[in-house]
Image (cartoon, rainbow, N blue to C red):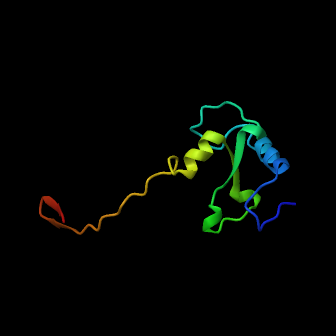
Amino acid sequence: MVNLNTRSVPAWYRRQIIREQQGKCANPKCLKTEINWKESETNHIIPWKSGGRTIRWNLEVLCITCHKNKTRSLLQKPRKKIKDEISYEKPRKSYRI
């Protein structure tokens, strides 16, 4: 049983997740063809500090490089700033403010 109140994941549970992921890093952009439990780290999909729990649906295994990059936010998509746009139409032209 995994303790839901801790952030750490036991090695046996990480190995199980790796088997479910067919021995691959969860990052689809990763170039590594295969990872083992010694060269991988467990990642909380919803971060622990944001209330993500240590349960299976919230865990994935990444290679060490991808995990470091994700924690540095290099793999996360940048948030787009939404500009308030007001548009109106006049005959034959569209204007945006």
Image quadrant in which the C terminus is located: bottom left
Q: Quadrant of residue 3?
A: bottom right
Depth check, front residue: 45 or 20: 45
Q: Residue at x 73, y 42 (%)?
A: 21
Percent coordinates x, y for residue 59 in the rendering: 71, 55
Percent coordinates x, y for residue 41 in the rendering: 70, 46
Image quadrant in which the N terminus is located: bottom right
- Is residue 82 shown above or below 70? below
Horizontal arrangement in the rendering, residue 67 relative to residue 55 (left or right): left
Q: Residue at x 69, y 58 (%)?
A: 58
Q: Residue at x 59, y 46 (%)?
A: 68
Q: Residue at the far right: name it.
A: 1
Percent coordinates x, y for residue 81 in the rendering: 36, 61
- Is residue 10 shown above or below 4? above
Depth check, front residue: 30 or 84: 30
Q: Quadrant of residue 56?
A: bottom right
